[in-house]
Image: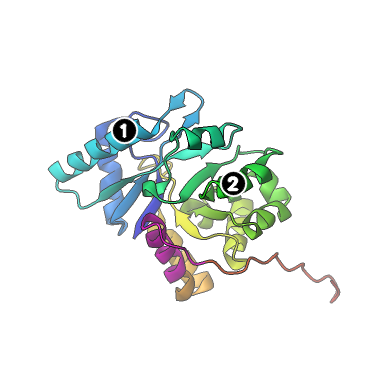
Amino acid sequence: MIDIHTHILPGVDDGAKTEEDSIAMAKQAVNQGITTIVATPHHRNGSYFNDKSSIVHNVNILNQLLSDHHIPLEILPGQETRINGDMIIDIDADDLLPINYSKYLFVEFPSASVPRYAKQMLFDIQMKGYTPVIVHPERNQELVEQQDKLYNFVKNGALTQVTAASLIGKFGKDIQKYANQLIECNQTHFIASDAHNIKSRKFVMAEAFDHVRTKFGNDYVYILQENAQLLVNNSNVNRMEPTQPKKKKFLGLF
């Protein structure tokens, strides 16, 4: 199993604080059946700043540390970038780090809103040859309340990644409902942990895929897991035509 979104690098953002924390996270990941992890520290977020070269350097150090401790887990480089007006400038300056040097670039929205320029920015990213992957959209208040927005982003070429903990209710029932709906409506393409630690923000990938298997069937598990492999291999991922949720009937009428 591949986990494409984690905060396992020590001391760089709000994830692992020490090397010991990273080792503990790595052991938990292995126990979940995870063999490969993408480290995706925040690019610029509050007081955090992680540029491309520093991430690659820290990934190499962590891989050596895990090897020294005989932990069978591979770390790949990535980055979680909060959407901002300078993203194209940063792409041109080779400052942004796509997932494992691929064409797939993580884009994070603020938790409560979607910037007005988001549609144009997602388009501009694609014009630069990258595919934007909107991370944890189910945890964005505006997308939950105005569900046409994410549908249109996906329709226009963006991919999305749902958080494993969301699917099993760790962020509340409303977020869980929307996360499940995104799978049902082909509006998401990956499940990842967004793990920050081994307690409050742990991996729960095995539990999430068990949930998907029970609710949607083995085919969805296979597609979502294969997409993670295709992403890190820089191959085209499986996409199905996105749909909008069916409106519920009231007294037999739409």
- Name the kind of residue labelled 1 in the image: Pro
Say whether residue 238 is left or right of residue 16.
right
Give the CA separation, mark 1 to mark 2. Answer: 25 Å
Q: Which mark is residue 193?
A: none
Bin the neighbour count of mark 1 within 10 Å (Cα to Cα): few under 14, some 14-19, many 20 and up.
many
Residue 183, percent from left and from top: 57, 64
Residue 2, percent from left and from top: 35, 57
Is residue 146 found inside the magenta-colored segment of the image? no
**Which secondary structure dominates the residues rendered in magenta?**
helix
Foreground residue, 23 or 107? Answer: 107
- Name the kind of residue labelled 2 in the image: Arg
Q: From the image, which quarter does the N terminus lie in?
A: bottom left
Foreground residue, 114 or 180? Answer: 114
| Residue at 56% in and 45% down | 125
Secondary structure found at label 2: helix
Q: Earlier in the sequence, mark 1 or mark 2?
A: 1
Read off the residue under disc 2: 139
Q: From the image, which quarter does the C terminus lie in?
A: bottom right
Say whether residue 165 is left or right of residue 61.
right
| Residue at 36% in and 58% down | 233
Say whether residue 69 is left or right of residue 38.
left
| Residue at 63% in and 48% down | 123
Q: Which residues are magenta?
A: 221-238
Read off the residue under disc 1: 10
> Against 130, is 242 above or below?
below
